[in-house]
Image (cartoon, coloured by chain):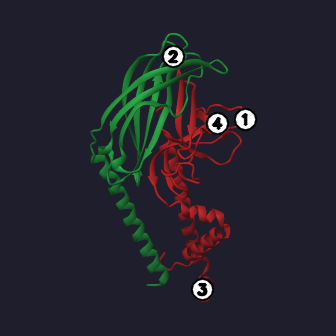
Amino acid sequence: MMEFITETYKELKRMNVRQFLGQALQLGLIVTSALMIWKSLMLVTGSESPVVVVLSGSMEPGFYRGDILFLNMGKAPIRTGEVVVFNLDGRDIPIVHRVIKVHERRNGTHIDVLTKGDNNFGDDRALYNKGQDWLHQHHIMGRAVGFLPKVGMVTIIMNDYPYLKYALIGVLGLLVLTNKDA
Amino acid sequence: MHSIYHRLNTAVTFFGTVAAVLCILTSSTDLLHKSNPNIKLGLREVRRLVQHHGGKDQAVVTFDVNADLRSVFTWNTKQLFVYVQAEYETQENRINEVVLWDSIVQQKDKAVFKLSNHKTKYAFIDPGHNLRGRDVNLTLVWCVMPRVGRMYTERHTVSVGKMPATYI
């Protein structure tokens, strides 16, 4: 580890300004490509967060903590059985649960939706804001269409231990900066 | 040139690529799978039809299900989420869907349902008072949840006639 740090330091010292700027540009390119991919996914799926990590056990045994869901909003109206991600007014953390009741008005402008976690005993009215009986279209951020097990555990661990996240970003950044191939 | 970093980077990238391709291939085998489930479904009895507190109609019903969903399972199926719902149209609403009963099946052998005169798991409540004399459909729905990849849903609907014209 010590060796790695001194090596990196020597490498950085040896570089001239031109080289350093080139490498910094390289790093910037990586960050912006990631951002571009994310934003394009948002456009394609119509969902403001196209990929979510399951944070609770309320959908077990289908989804466990750390599983990844791919979301799509689509034009089709919400129907029962779909697993939707919704955000309650005034809350930060989105919830992933299954739709168990739908009442859609004749003109199609208004929809009442009730959700429930597969692993929960009762429906989500206990979870909703006080006096709220239904979710409406604007609460819903997307519906789950694809599933990838376990991979999201990485982000959960990094959120639980933020220093690990900073360390990882720092090391990766240094590696890109001192990369000799570019 | 062949530093530890490079070797590690190549190994991790290669592992990721292979894993992603395998996941896509595995999920796409489901597209070729054709299931032929055998389903009988019906409403047995309307035991009560009352005004719930607050003027909402509530029906107490029993139903029959005779379904064999074993052919839905593939090697990539983690579980089926199976449910029965009532569907009806009202003057106000084009779509009303109310889930009455559900079950999670994780093993292929257990995907056979024989329910007779079965009580609902969830209350059959209309948000208004629209259930009297209402034409109702029952639908058996199975959501296929994969080990990896695409989730999809299939259904079987039957018309079960009208609800009683008066409260009982």
Asked if residue A79 can be seen in this view, the reply is no
Q: Percent position (x, y) of residue B8?
A: 46, 78
Label 3 SS:
loop
Pair 2/3: label in front: 2
Q: Earlier in the sequence, mark 1 or mark 3?
A: 3
Asked if badge 2 and badge 3 are on a common chain, one would say no
Quadrant, the N terminus of chain B: bottom left
The chain letter for the residue carrying disc 4 is: A
Q: Report helix, strand or loop for mark 1.
A: loop
Q: Nearer the viewer, mark 1 or mark 3?
A: 1
What is the spatial separation of the Cα atoms under label 1 and label 3, in whole angstroms? 54 Å
Q: CA distance from mark 4 to mark 3?
A: 52 Å
**Which chain is painted in red?**
A
Left or right of A7 in this view: A74:
left
Q: Which residue is mark 1?
A: A130
Name the residue beneath numbered marker 2.
B90
Q: Which residue is mark 4?
A: A125
CA gap between label 2 and label 3 equals 70 Å
Relative to A102, say whether A150 is above or below: below
A106 versus B4 height, above or below: above
